[in-house]
Amino acid sequence: MAPECLERLRSIFPGERLLLDPADRLSCSFDASFGEYVPEAVVQPKSKEEIAGVMRLANEFLFPVCPRGAATSLSGGPLPVKGGLVLDLSQMRARLEIDRENMLAIVSPGIITGDLHREADAAGLFYPPDPSSSAVSTIGGNLLENAGGPRGLKYGTTKEYVIGLEAVAPTGEIFRTGGRTVKNVTGYDLTRLIVGSEGTLAVVTEAIVRLLPRPRDRRTLLASFPRFIESGRAITRILASGILPAAMEMMDNACIRAVEAYEPCGLPADAEAVVIIEVDGHPRAVEDEIEQCARCCREAGARDVRVASGEIERDRIWRSRRMISPAIARMGPTKISEDATVPRSRIPGMMERLVGIREKHRLNLVVFGHAGDGNLHPNIITDKRNKEEMRRAEDAVGEIFQAALELGGTLSGEHGIGIMKSAYMEKEVGEAGLAMMRRIKDAWDPNNILNPGKIFPEPGRIKVNLTE
């Protein structure tokens, strides 16, 4: 950056919130996906005015600005791929207010999602979005990636709960969208446009989110299946029966064995798949529905069905699900995490395609995910130092995306596009759809300052590149 630009940044961020040391910049060069892109500087704002000042300066000196939360992104969302400045929002934690009367929360973007869960629960309320990273991920990051989680089956993703925002535009203006009312149809729905925009349209400085009454009861079961395909049939059978569980999670045999090796949870190591099902609501309805779910699993071919007898056993079942990512990370130094999503009725077909891709490319491909809403997480465990295997992984990733699209699905159910999937965008939304998105981006951000290099495909790139 030019010396004059750095001096102007120092005037906005006195003291230690302008980070220029190589070690500090390196710490903001990666996320939970691929690649390492070192920024020229990092700033840690604590107010909307500071962010507005950064954006005005960026447009004057024409340097990129990349918002960053806790960097749990699996698609490269916060990576400074064009250099420039990282806007570290993790220090914006001033506000976490629960409004019980209106069943709302007002939160700063740096608030940890798990803290919002705990505060809402203490007030007898419930914030449904529950990404697996909720213990460390920030609300701001969840919002801009439109995060989901196991409860997305019944309760939807983050966008269903954000009803108001305070934000800074790419050109530096501070503005508000929505408000504290559940109903609001005044003008364009800018709130929904910003949620899921992956930091390309605005920097969120405050959010108003809806809360729900806490469910009165919940029951959980674990069903094991001798064949992978039967677990998919059980899921579609339950959904066809008229029951809408709060969550339906699936893991294949490789996941099961990895979890048991990492931290034994009592999972059947010889099962090809297990499914975790949770229902919540009125106690009488919950009791009836968990019994129906157990029956559907047995009819689909489950070898064993175990309904948790209480909270301790329930927590043990869910802990096995939470252990998947750290457990499979031990299987190899490189983990490629995807989240191709298909309609619920096509879950068995997608499972068959994934098995075929694994065998064709001779890869260590494990599958888990939020199977009830069709959001599967195929993970390829490999070693980026093995270029030949990484090329096979590239081809497999492309085939996973193609399979999802052919089955009527989407490239991403919750991880976002970022840089990992941008090459495939036109295949899903079409040339006209992509052009419309570009026109929105150009109108909001005429100098392409805010998080450039994300969502939109780079010229000449036709697939994900894992070996560059």
Image (cartoon, rainbow, N blue to C red):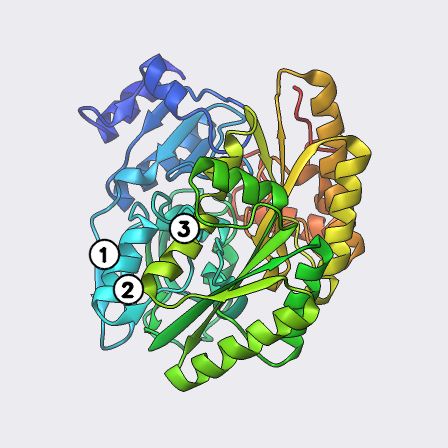
Report crowding for label 2: few under 14, some 14 to 19, many 20 or more residues within 10 A (C-alpha): many
Q: Which mark is on residue 28?
A: none
Q: Element at badge 1?
A: strand
Q: Name the residue under label 2.
A: 105
Q: Element at badge 3?
A: helix
- Amino acid under disc 1: Leu
Horizontally, residue 248 falls left or right of residue 107, namely right
Horizontally, residue 91 falls left or right of residue 410, namely left
Taking 409 as reference, is 21 above or below it?
A: above
Indicate the quadrant where residue 363 lies: top right
Q: Element at badge 2?
A: strand
Query: In this rendering, does residue 254 appear at all?
Result: yes
Residue 466 or 379: which is nearer the viewer? Answer: 379
Residue at (63% x, 41% y) in the render: 366
Residue at (23% x, 56% y) in the render: 96
Indicate the quadrant where residue 262 lies: top left
Q: How far is mark 1 from mark 2, CA to CA? A: 7 Å
Q: Do the residues labelled 2 and 3 touch (CB within 8 Å)?
A: no
Q: Position of residue 48 (x, y in %)?
A: 28, 45
Horizontally, residue 86 falls left or right of residue 46, namely right
Q: Mark 3 points at which residue?
A: 319
Q: Which mark is on residue 96?
A: 1
- Amino acid under disc 3: Arg
Q: Where is residue 306 in the image (x, y as percent from the top left)?
A: 50, 65
Q: Do the residues labelled 1 and 2 touch (CB within 8 Å)?
A: yes
Taking 196 as reference, is 305 above or below it?
A: below
Q: How far is mark 1 from mark 3, CA to CA? A: 27 Å
Residue at (57% x, 52% y) in the render: 369
